[in-house]
Image: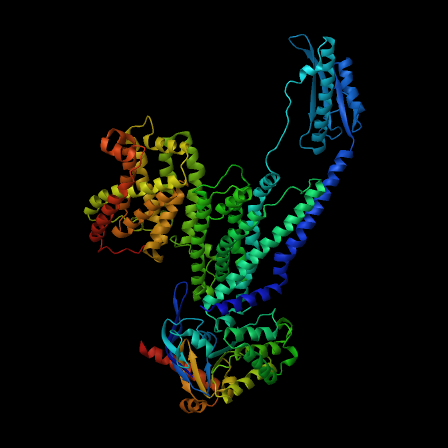
Amino acid sequence: MIEVKNLTKIFNQKDSTLYAVDNLSFTANKGEIVVLLGVNGAGKTTTMRMLSTVLKPNSGSATVEGFDINLNPQRVRVNLGFLSGDTGLYARLTAREVITYFGELYDVSKPKIKERINEMADLLDMHDFLDKKVDLLSTGMKQKVSIARSIVHDPPVMIFDEPTAGLDILTAKNIVDFIHQCKNEGKCVLFSTHIMREAERIADKIVMIHEGKILAEGTLTEMREKSNLQDLDDIFIHFVNNSKVEANDEF
Amino acid sequence: MNFKKVFTIYKKELLDLMRDRRTVITAVVVPLIMYPLMMIGVSSLMMRQEKKLDDQIATICVIDNVQDKNSAKIIQQLENFDKFQLMPYVAGSGNLIEDNIVKAIITISDSINTSNYQIIKALISYNAADEKSEKVYRQLKNKLDTVEQILVSERLQKIQIDTDILNAVEIIQENIAPPEQMFGLLVSKMLPYMLILLMISGGAVVASDLIAGEKERKTLETILVSAAHRNELVFGKYLTVITISLITVCLNLVSLYFSLHHLLSQVGMDMVGIQLPIGNFALILLLMLPLATLFSAILISISTYSRNIKEAQSLQMPLMFASMMAAMISMFPAIELNLGMALIPVVNFALLFKEIIMGNFQLNYFLIVLGSTLLLDVIAIYFSVKLFNNESILFRTTEEKSLKFWGKNKKNIFNPQFIMLFFIAISLALFYLGGKWQAADLPEGLIRTQLFIILLPTIFVLRISKSDIKKVLRFNPTNPLNFGVVLLLSIPVMIIVGTISQLINIIFPFPESYLEMMKNLVQMNGVSTWKLLFIIAVLPGVCEEIMFRGFIINAFTKKGFWYAIIVTGVLFGIMHLDPFRLIPVTILGIWMGYLLLKTNTILIPIFAHFINNALAILLGKYGESIPIINKLIVEQEFSWWLIIPAILAFVWLLKIFDKINKNNTLSEVA
């Protein structure tokens, strides 16, 4: 499970400081799909990068399977599978070599890696291209290799950072199917997107964020009740406007 | 750190690189194919050209102004030589050599010496820039030497003297240098340069691919979220760069050796008897390791900083040029390894390699070179690891240093870009204009330099930017006690800086002419002490302080107290355009900056600058006549022990100074 507590990330820009993530707190439990929903630049990627220990928070903390991202980043990464549009693959290696390499980095034993590759190849139907260079694979095939890469160590927590961005329906479906499967296996899943339809379809819980802050948190039904609106697009805009009113009240 | 993971990363990177055509071509194919092709191609082309030149029949023009039997002998000799074709001179036919009609003109005239013998004079006009013409000249000279021998023996016979009388000294040439040393001399000049260059270029291609390339291909984040520690990643990649650069060097060496072998045997010089000192080569290869680690660490740092391969490559260029120039030192004659040279990176290796190839290196320098490089290694590796762990460097995205920036900030002149431009312009003016003025008339030139190159432009820039000059320059009142403390501080500061100068003198001895020049400057014969004090102490104190501590430092105060002081100090040191004084002057500059920011008034640094320069003049003028000072400073022996009381006094006085000024707050200017 993931527990985020008062997580804050500041970027120093030329003349100003930007609160990319501002005092963010939420939890994601085992067997639950939590969707981080927000427009571009809302702070979704920064949050996920902090959870995967690529970036360090300025203040606040988070735990992944009980391991603190500040104190024990190594253990956090071992318990985490991370997949995003930005996680590329080594084009000059074959699919099998890529998966093996990451398996070794995750300290998975050699025979275990072989076993996992076979399992995943069955599951994702990738026997045909296991020994082809990644460079020669289609987008869909690459996506499958990426998925295999991210779960080679069978992590209990999965983080997906806009994994479907720029994919066609069929390849996107691979991912969505895979996410459901992770849930069925009891994994904790954190998924980010700016597409409302996607969130509606797969979320157990939605965390709406805007300008680094939480707008609203809860299941889709809860949000509909709270806002008296049906469509998630409308609900999102409703909460954004609400937050603006609140901000103005403060002054 | 888990070394098993480092090795996993290393293995993968090598596999990945070996599948990259670019790396394979630069690291493997080029050395293996290019050298042989080049050597064979060049050697056969050279030989063909040589033969062609040889076979060509040269037309030469003969002007015989003597026309007797002796000159006829010369002409006969030339006619009999089948590589020459003689052509009679026709008056007014223009410049035959320049028009490439003939390769040489030989004009024969004669005169009579004091013993009444005829001397034939042969003027050979030829074009030394033309290879064939040059060759013809040598052939002509040969023929004339033969004629001379004939004529001399004729004369001797006439007076009945045996021609053997001419053989009084016979020179027998014996070269005792062993063949490998002859070969070594040739190789020692080129090889260090080539080795260093090959090593960097081999490593550079790989290094830019390893991190900047991963950023470009978006695989960096993939690897960062894996369980590998960042230090493991850097070290894995780092080992890869070292490996590839050493492989490049080895392959190049092997290929070069065989190509050279081939070339020499083609030219007819056999390599039999010329044994390459393999033991020395092995030592050099071993020594490449610390150098390779140093360069790899720097290259990895560049790659970490860069956003893409292209940026990495352009940032590598200065490194390449600098090391190329440093390595070139092995090609200069008569430069040998000494204590100073042994401390300069790259230069020390170039010279050490040269000496090892020649088989006469000294162990103490060997150890200094090795030690200093290992120290730099540790620093460079530490730095590259730090850099890789710095997320704002690793994920650098903003266009901070684009050219657009130069045009911006028009109103605010206190930005580092504008200040740097200003600084460069002033430095150039000092070099060209100031140097010229001072060469013409030293005192006059110094006054003009201070007023027109340093003070005036500073005031001008401040005026046109409509700055509040008094506020910018910090013309603020101050506690009068400061003048007293700073006056006292000047003495220990001078001793400390002087000691540092002496230390530099030991490592890089100042040339005699330089010391003479400096002495001249502070004594300046024919100028009264008062005028000297004005030129050397008052003017620089005011003008230089207004430029540096008044103006330039303001561009850097935003980045922090010490940053501003140190950057301004270094610029101050550089502006003196004097490599021997760079460090002492920089330290003085830093000291002045400290005084300014602590007291928040320009008056104190001006005063301290004045005192420092004035002390130098007074010591130079009168030091010898005051017994105690003469004993301490002026005499040849430098009193090293002075540094201890100086440091103690400095620390104590600085405490008092800080106490006086602890309530000052720095006014923000820009």
Residue in view at x 51 percent, y 71 percent: B223
| Position of the C terminus of chain A by quadrant | bottom left
Question: Is B156 placed above or below B554 here?
Answer: above
In the visual, does B81 lie left or right of B525?
right
- How far across and down, in percent of the image, does residue A22 sit? 38, 75
On screen, residue B56 versus residue B606, left or right, reads right
Q: Quadrant of the N terminus of chain A?
A: bottom left
**Residue at left 53%, top 46%?**
B353
What percent of the width, then of the height, locates residue B270? 69, 41
In this view of the protein, which residue sits in the foreground, A43 or B632?
B632
For this rendering, which residue is in front, B193 or A34?
B193
Task: Answer whether residue B477 is visible to the viewer in this image.
Answer: no
Number of residue marks: 0
Viewer-proximal residue among B326 and B98: B326
Q: Relative to residue B128, is residue A86 depicted above or below? A: below
Indicate how the structure is coloured in the image.
rainbow
The correct choice, above or below, for B391 with respect to A126 in the image is: above
Q: Is residue B234 left or right of residue B269?
A: left
* Picture layout, residue A144 above or below residue B370: below
Q: Residue B628, image x and y in percent?
A: 23, 33
Residue B387 locus on image (x, y percent) = 44, 62
Q: Quadrant of residue B494?
A: top left
From the viewer's side, name the closer residue of A46 and B233. B233
In terms of image quadrants, where is residue A27? bottom left
Q: Could you tell me if residue A202 is visible in this image?
A: yes
